[in-house]
Amino acid sequence: MTSLHSVGAPGARAGLAPPAADASVDRPHGARVAAGLAAFAAWRARQGPASQDQYDWWATRYGLWAKARFYRHGWPVAPLVAPLIGLDMAWPSARRWVTPPRRFAIADAHYVLGDAARHRATGAAAARAAAIAGGEALLDTALPGFAGPCWGYPFDWQTRRGLVRRGTPLITTTPYVFDAMLELHALTATARYRETALAIAAFVASDIRDTAIGGGLAASYTPFDRSAVVNASAYRAACLARAGALASNGEYLRLARANAQFVAEQQRGDGAWSYSASDPQDRFVDHIHTCFVLKGLYRTARALADDRFLAVVAQGFAYYRRALFTADGAPRPFAETPWPRLARLELYDCAEALNLALLLRDALPTAPLAHAMAARLLALQLPNGAFVTRILRGGVRHRVPYHRWAQAQAYCALARYAEWQAVH
């Protein structure tokens, strides 16, 4: 397949080299990475499968009420949400008094992916066993009543587009379980996992709704909305493109191409994507959603063998490196946002930057970025094995660990890095 180096997109010609700060970062030693993964696995065994979450305050009855009014009325009612923001920033551990720890499918799926990668990198039998156990737990928590297995959040989630009830399937969660099932099939050669992955694709194709916008189709976030959130379409495109190629399903491939076309058309001239194509209040540009879009579109392009989408990825990656990193190479949480932000560094951003760099490594010169992000993740690891969740602008470090946001993603990224290093 044609690489991004030869596509000839504007982004492929303009500044794809990483910042100079990345080039000076030494490659983390394999033994150090293995030790970090082992320490995290030990912490996870002590922690158990449930944890507090980034959204705990906002999932309380008051949090849902205050957030809905803020979305409706804006700054005049900011005092309603200010106490929760203050608690989240100044006293994150207090959330344990109002919300119990919960288990999250998106975290379980990342742990399956990370455990499988760690097993391949180190041969650890415990990692293989953990991956299989995690996959079985995911199967036990699938939501009934849809065209195939699907997963969502275990809490109510107030969005600008309305309230998403707990147990509502999400296109931003379910494809990770699709990936985990295919990973388990590769790991164990058990046909049931492949069959489950294809059943998941049936949900993604049948229950997620499409809205025609431009020359493509915008995928909904859930089976019950008509939103046009860009990363939702990227998730659906990647899942259906892979499932379509795996099962020779032309309808899946058609839907994937249409969703990818919508994503491509929503790219701005500078290479960025706003979060939403339909809601002017959701036109922010941030780190993790940019990563989600780039990963989804790249995987779609690979599965469809369509170089047109590779050109879009090249331009988007150029913007990403230019606008979403600080001068010293740290991931920047937002490039554009209407709201003041107190966080200087997010664990989720570091994890997704490493995942993206590893995914694109055969198409773009992302090895320096991968080494830099692996080193940053290891630097964020605490003595107990977990990772720092967030660093505020004043330097305060949040140490309350959330499986979903983003201990699981960090572990998965570091395990994939170890696997890559083991063969290089």
Image (spheres, rainbow, N blue to C red):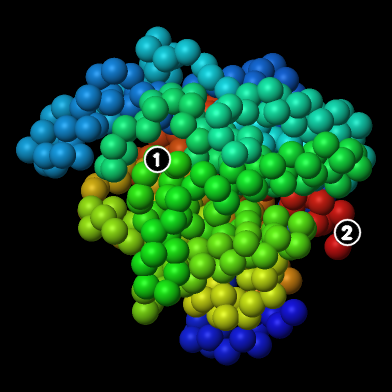
Query: Does any portion of residue 314 appear in the rendered image?
Result: no
> Hey, which residue is sitting farthest left in the picture?
76
Q: Which mark is residue 152?
A: none
Task: Out of 176 and 272, give the one closest to the viewer.
Answer: 176
Q: Amino acid at mark 2?
A: Val
Tell me the residue that label 2 is attached to. 423
Q: Can you identify the residue that label 1 sits on?
A: 224
* Quadrant housing residue 302: bottom right
Q: Position of residue 6 (x, y in %)?
A: 65, 88
Instruction: Estimate how packed mark 2 is, as few (under 14), some (14 to 19) or many (20 or more) residues with alpha carbons within 10 Å.
Output: few
Residue 397, image x and y in percent?
45, 34
Helix, strand or loop at mark 1 = loop
Hey, which residue is sitting farthest top in the picture? 97
The answer to which of 221 and 159 lies nearer the viewer is 221
Q: Is residue 188 left or right of residue 77?
A: right
Quadrant containing the N terminus is bottom right
Q: Nearer the viewer, mark 1 or mark 2?
A: 1
On the image, the x and y values in percent for residue 318 come to 50, 74
Q: Amino acid at mark 1?
A: Phe
Relative to 33, residue 372 above or below? below
Residue 345 horizontal side relative to residue 269, left or right: right
Q: Is 367 situated above or below 283?
A: below
Given residues 26 and 337, the one toward you in this image is: 337
User: Of helix, strand and loop, which one carries label 2?
Assistant: loop
Instruction: Please name whichever residue, 232 or 146, is drawn nearer the observer in this view of the structure.
Output: 146
Q: At 34% across and 40% down in the image, what residue appears?
A: 394
Image position of 122 (left or right of 160): right
The image quadrant that residue 307 belongs to is: bottom right
